[in-house]
Amino acid sequence: MFLCRAYRQRYGVYAAAGILYNHESVRRSEAFVSRKIVQGAVRIRRGQQERLALGDLGAAVDWGYAPDYVNAMWRILRLPEADDFVIATGIQHTVQEFAEIAFSRLGLDWSQYVVEEGSILKRSTPLMLGNPQKLMAKTGWKPSVTFQQMIEIMVKQVEQDG
């Protein structure tokens, strides 16, 4: 971001920068908790897995849908003047909320399958909440899907992929 600003100010280069908060899609690996939850819920539904171990269920994250973030970047690059932006939803949801929605989409009660294991995530997590107001004001961008819709899309895709 510093280099973008420097080149923009010093040389007049059109250099826009963005800080992207968690942007989710089915392309995520299982190293990411969002994908781990979705994949685990589908496997449990199919009888391929008995439980899902997660870290801090109360951890709150600003989760958005990756295609929406691509749309935000596209809008940023079409502005007449380059600037720096935060690409986020501005809304936090917990890991537990994510699990509740994913399991519910499959007709399952998350609390019967999810166990919290504090050893999974040992580091403290900083506040994960972005402020997209500047982005929204300058580009007209807003998320096209809700948190729940994003999870439902992810679950449906994993179900279809087998």
Image (cartoon, helix red, strand yellow):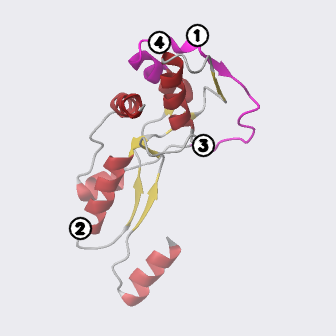
Q: Position of residue 28 (x, y in %)?
A: 49, 45
Q: Amino acid at mark 3?
A: Ala
Along the viewing direction, whichever of 20 and 114 lies nearer the viewer: 114
Along the viewing direction, whichever of 100 and 31 lies nearer the viewer: 31
Along the viewing direction, whichever of 94 and 101 lies nearer the viewer: 101
Which mark, by number, is residue 73? none
Magenta includes 144? no
Q: Residues within 10 Å of mark 1 (few under 14, many from 20)?
A: few
Could you tell me how far apart the alpha carbons at marks 4 and 3 are, in whole angstroms? 23 Å
Outermost residue, bottom side: 11
Question: The magenta stretch spans which residues?
Answer: 100-127
Could you tell me how far apart the alpha carbons at marks 2 and 4 are, in whole angstroms? 44 Å
In the picture of the structure, the residue carrying the numbered disc 3 is: 31
In the picture of the structure, the residue carrying the numbered disc 4 is: 108
For the residues bearing labels 1 and 4, Cβ distance under 8 angstroms: yes
Q: Quadrant of the C terminus?
A: top left
Could you tell me how far apart the alpha carbons at marks 1 and 2 are, in whole angstroms? 48 Å
Could you tell me how far apart the alpha carbons at marks 2 and 3 are, in whole angstroms? 34 Å
In the picture of the structure, the residue carrying the numbered disc 2 is: 78
Of callouts 4 and 3, the N-terminal one: 3
Which residue is pictured at 33% across the width and 48% down the height?
Answer: 67
Q: Position of residue 22 (x, y in %)?
A: 48, 46
For the question of whether residue 94 can be seen, the reply is: no
In the picture of the structure, the residue carrying the numbered disc 1 is: 112
Of callouts 3 and 1, the N-terminal one: 3
Q: Secondary structure at mark 2?
A: loop
